[in-house]
Structure formats: structure tokens, C-alpha cells
Image: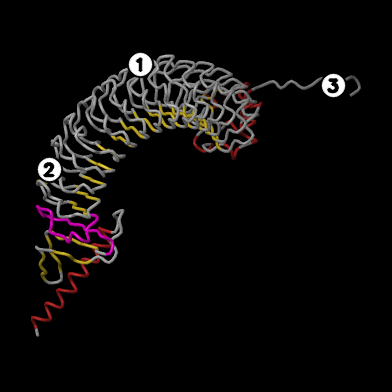
């Protein structure tokens, strides 16, 4: 009776623990684990009221899935007739032996992640041509056998990110019948170069992720056969140069990320023939200059990121072919002191423009005259001393304007007369010179205090000394010793 009691008690402790694991650890997976049942737990023991385990597998026959965690070192003997999805996470599996998955004739999705896997035998996936998704992320792989995926004719997704792969054979995808592969992730490895023909057989590829490697160069023609590619991620590498026309054969491309590399120059016409591009990132490159003929016709481009560079000037026609651009980010370019008058000439749909944290000292009166849809303009953290009175004449939809932390000493009293839908204006941290010329803007602030979001942070006089820290909105002509001219009265008036 006593023995039965402890067995009965252990049964409930085990199942209570499994239920907690399900809710705390497993249910956050993208696949549901309904009706989870314990399939095997070879190293489980109960001591008092605590459950100890070194590994276990949970299977859900109703949805055809199984998940194993712990110190298992082999592919567990699960029921092949009910296993469509197999997840092996945080295990001690080091080797995938030849034909490891041949018994699982119905397996379509395999995930081995955050494990000690460092060796894949040449025929590890042979005998499992039905696989549609293989995820081997965050392991210790450094080498991939050239023909390891040669039988994966149905594979649609392949994720190899977060490993230690330093090089890839040009034969890796050549021997494959991967006519259906549409997603390939090689991010967070140690790749230094890529064979020119590596991706040529992957004609259905839609997403290619190569970010966070150590790539220094890309060979001309590397992407020539990827006419269906939608996303190309090359950020966070060490790319120093790109060959001309590298992206010319990507007519379907929607997103191109080249940020956080070591680019100093970009060849002319590099971004021609990208008619469907919607997002382009070039930020965090030590760019010194850009050619006048850089951007081709981009009628669908909506986002451009070009910040944290060494650019001291910009070609006047840089954005001329981006008529549908919605967001333009040109900040943290601390060598940029001026902007061409016609720089924003052809951006009628631009809604957000960030020019913050540059080194701008003055702006042309016509600079924003074509930005008829602009809603957000960030000019903070520059060295502007004043603004032309008509600079916002055509920005009738402007709602948010940041001018804080410049060197503003003066603003024309009518500078905001056309910004009738303005909701948020920041002016603090400037060097206002409180003489008689400041009264126009001081009176405007007094009449519109709710529009100034940082009024309490110091929109105050910087000079003269006797008025230092005096709020602009409370200034009077008498305090400034200004002579106010009154209109002449007619005789007898």
C-alpha cells in the first residue's frame, strides 16, 4: 500500500511538472502543443516534492509534433507515423549520422537549435526527401558537406544562422534539386567570402539573409539568377566595396540592407533596375561621397536610411527618382554642413524627414518647398543659427517639428504662419539673443504655448547676460528697451 501511494504521488508530481513546462516553456513556440503527452523521459526521478530530469520528449500525436530537450545525444525513437514536426532544442546532439531521418517518412519540418551539433555526415538527410523546412540555428557547425542537401527536392526553408561556418563549398547548392527553396538564412556565421555561383540554382529564392558575417567583398554576378528574390540582407558585415551592377538582376527585390558595413564609396548606377524596391538601408557606413548617377527609377521606394556616415555633401539629384518615398533618414552625419537647394525637389509624398544630429549651419529658403505632404521634420541637434521666414511656406501638413539643441539666436516672427496644423514644436537648448528682433517669435510663443512641447525645459534667453534664462514668452518691449513706433494720427484725429 505504501509503495502504491508513492507511485501514485509520483505520477501526479510528474504530470503537474509537465503541465507547468507546457505553459511556461513550450507553449511559446510558434506551433501549438495541444494534448501534450509524455512520450519518454529516460532520466527522470522524484525526490520529495521536486522533479529532477536530464532530458525528455513531449509528443502530441493529434497535431503530429514532438519536442525534445535535455542531454540526449541521439535522434529519439519517436513514432514515425505521427511525427510531422520534430523540435530538438538545447540538447547534446553533436552528430547527425547518415540517414538519421529516413525512418520518419512523414516528417516535413525539422528544428535542431541551441545544441552542441558540430558534425553533419554527408548523407544525414538522405532518405527524407519530403522535408520542407530544416532549421539548424544556434549550434556549433563549422563545415557543411557539399552534397548534404542533394535529395531535398521539396525543401522550402533552410536556416543555418548562428553557427560557426567560415566557408561554403560552391557545390553545396549545385547538387541540390532545390527548385522550391524560397528562404535561406546564413546570418551570424563567420563567412568571409561567397563563391560566385553559390546561389545560381536557387531560382525560386525569395529571402536571402547573409547579415552578421565577416564578408569583405562580393563577386560580380553573385545574385544574377535570383530574379524572384524579395529580401536581401547584407548588413553587419565588413564589406568594403561592391562591384558595379551587383544588384541589376534583382527586378523583384523589395528590401535591400547594406547597413553597418565598411563602404567608403559606391559605384555609379549601383541601384539601377530595382523598380520594386520599397526599402533601402545604407546607414553606419563610412561613406565619403556618393556619385551623381547612383539611384535609378524607384517608383515604389518608401524608406531610405542614410545615417551615421562621413558624407560632407550630397548630390543634388540623389532622391530625384524616388517620388513615392515616405520616410527619409539622414541623421548623425556630423560632417554634413549644408544641403543642396534642390535636394528634396521630387518628393511630393514624403511624410517623415529626419535631419537631426548633423552639422547643418543654414538652410536654403526653398529647401522644403516641394515637400507638400511632410508631417514630421526633425532638425534638432544641428548648428542652425536662424531660419528663413518662408522656409515652411509649403509644408502645410507639418505636425511635428524639432528645432531643439541648435544654435538658434533668432527666428522670424512669421516663420510658423503657414504651419497651421502644427501640434508639437520643440525649441529648447538654443542660444536665443534677446534683443528687439526676438519679440516677433516671443509673441508667437506667448500666443501658442500649448504647441511648444518643451517650454518647461528652457526656451529662454542666452544673451544678454542681464536676461539670461528669462523665458521668451514673458519678454516685453520695455525689458528689451525697444522703441515701439506708433502709426501717425491724421490732423484732428
Say whether disc 2 or disc 1 marks the residue closer to the N-terminus. 2
Category of crowding for the residue at label 3, using alpha-carbon neighbours closer than 10 angstroms: few (below 14), some (14–19), many (at least 20): few
User: Residue 267 has which mark?
Assistant: 1
Which residue is the extreme one toward the bottom? Answer: 1
Q: Position of residue 343 (x, y in %)?
A: 51, 19
Numbered mark located on residue 123 in the image = 2
Q: Tag 3, which secondary structure?
A: loop
Give how far apart the Cα atoms at labels 1 and 3 are.
69 Å
Quadrant of the image containing the N terminus:
bottom left
Q: Residues within 10 Å of mark 2 (few under 14, many from 20)?
A: some
**Measured along the vertical axis of the image, is residue 274 above or below residue 31?**
above
> Could you say which quadrant of the image residue 6 lies in?
bottom left
Residue 327 x/y as whole percent: 48, 32
- Real-space Cα distance between discs 2 and 1? 43 Å
Magenta-tinted stretch? 62-85
Residue furthest to the right: 492
Q: Is label 1 in a helix, a strand or a loop?
A: loop
Q: Residue at x 47, y 23 (%)?
A: 297
* Residue 142 seen from this side: no
Amino acid at each position: 500500500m505504501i509503495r502504491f501511494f508513492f507511485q501514485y504521488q509520483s505520477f501526479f508530481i510528474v504530470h503537474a511538472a509537465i503541465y507547468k513546462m507546457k505553459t511556461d516553456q513550450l507553449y511559446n513556440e510558434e506551433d501549438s502543443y495541444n494534448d501534450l503527452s509524455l512520450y519518454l523521459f529516460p532520466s527522470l526521478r522524484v525526490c520529495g516534492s521536486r522533479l529532477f530530469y536530464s532530458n525528455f520528449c513531449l509528443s502530441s500525436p493529434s497535431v503530429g509534433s514532438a519536442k525534445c530537450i535535455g542531454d540526449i545525444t541521439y535522434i529519439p525513437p519517436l513514432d514515425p507515423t505521427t511525427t510531422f514536426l520534430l523540435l530538438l532544442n538545447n540538447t547534446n546532439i553533436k552528430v547527425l549520422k547518415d540517414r538519421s531521418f529516413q525512418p520518419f517518412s512523414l516528417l516535413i519540418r525539422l528544428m535542431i537549435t541551441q545544441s552542441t551539433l558540430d558534425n553533419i555526415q554527408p548523407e544525414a538527410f538522405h532518405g527524407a526527401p519530403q522535408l520542407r523546412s530544416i532549421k539548424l540555428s544556434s549550434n556549433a557547425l563549422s563545415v557543411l558537406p557539399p552534397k548534404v542537401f542533394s535529395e531535398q527536392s521539396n525543401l522550402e526553408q533552410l536556416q543555418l544562422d548562428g553557427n560557426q561556418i567560415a566557408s561554403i563549398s560552391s557545390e553545396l547548392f549545385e547538387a541540390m534539386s532545390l527548385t522550391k527553396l524560397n528562404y535561406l538564412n546564413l546570418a551570424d556565421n563567420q563567412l568571409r567570402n561567397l563563391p560566385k555561383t553559390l546561389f545560381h540554382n536557387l531560382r525560386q529564392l525569395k529571402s536571402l539573409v547573409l547579415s552578421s558575417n565577416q564578408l569583405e567583398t562580393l563577386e560580380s554576378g553573385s545574385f544574377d539568377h535570383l530574379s524572384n528574390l524579395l529580401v536581401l540582407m547584407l548588413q553587419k558585415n565588413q564589406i568594403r566595396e561592391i562591384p558595379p551592377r551587383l544588384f541589376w538582376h534583382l527586378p523583384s527585390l523589395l528590401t535591400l540592407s547594406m547597413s553597418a558595413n565598411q563602404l567608403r564609396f559606391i559605384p555609379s548606377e549601383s541601384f539601377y533596375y530595382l523598380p520594386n524596391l520599397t526599402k533601402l538601408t545604407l546607414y553606419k557606413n563610412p561613406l565619403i561621397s556618393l556619385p551623381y548617377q547612383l539611384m535609378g527609377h524607384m517608383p515604389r521606394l518608401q524608406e531610405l536610411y542614410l545615417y551615421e556616415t562621413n558624407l560632407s555633401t550630397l548630390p543634388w539629384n540623389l532622391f530625384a527618382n524616388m517620388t513615392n518615398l515616405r520616410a527619409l533618414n539622414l541623421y548623425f552625419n556630423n560632417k554634413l554642413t549644408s544641403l543642396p537647394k534642390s535636394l528634396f525637389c521630387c518628393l511630393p509624398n514624403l511624410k517623415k524627414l529626419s535631419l537631426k544630429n548633423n552639422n547643418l549651419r543654414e538652410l536654403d529658403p526653398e529647401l522644403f518647398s516641394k515637400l507638400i505632404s511632410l508631417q514630421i521634420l526633425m532638425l534638432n541637434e544641428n548648428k542652425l543659427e536662424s531660419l528663413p521666414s518662408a522656409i515652411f511656406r509649403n509644408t502645410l501638413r507639418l505636425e511635428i517639428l524639432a528645432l531643439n539643441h541648435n544654435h538658434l539666436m533668432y527666428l522670424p516672427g512669421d516663420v510658423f504662419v503657414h504651419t497651421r496644423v502644427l501640434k508639437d514644436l520643440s525649441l529648447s537648448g538654443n542660444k536665443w539673443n534677446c534683443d528687439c528682433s526676438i519679440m516677433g517669435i516671443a509673441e508667437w510663443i506667448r500666443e501658442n504655448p500649448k504647441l511648444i512641447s518643451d517650454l518647461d525645459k528652457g526656451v529662454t534667453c542666452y544673451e544678454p547676460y542681464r536676461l539670461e534664462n528669462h523665458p521668451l514668452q514673458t519678454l516685453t518691449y520695455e525689458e528689451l528697451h525697444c522703441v515701439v513706433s506708433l502709426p501717425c494720427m491724421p490732423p484732428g484725429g
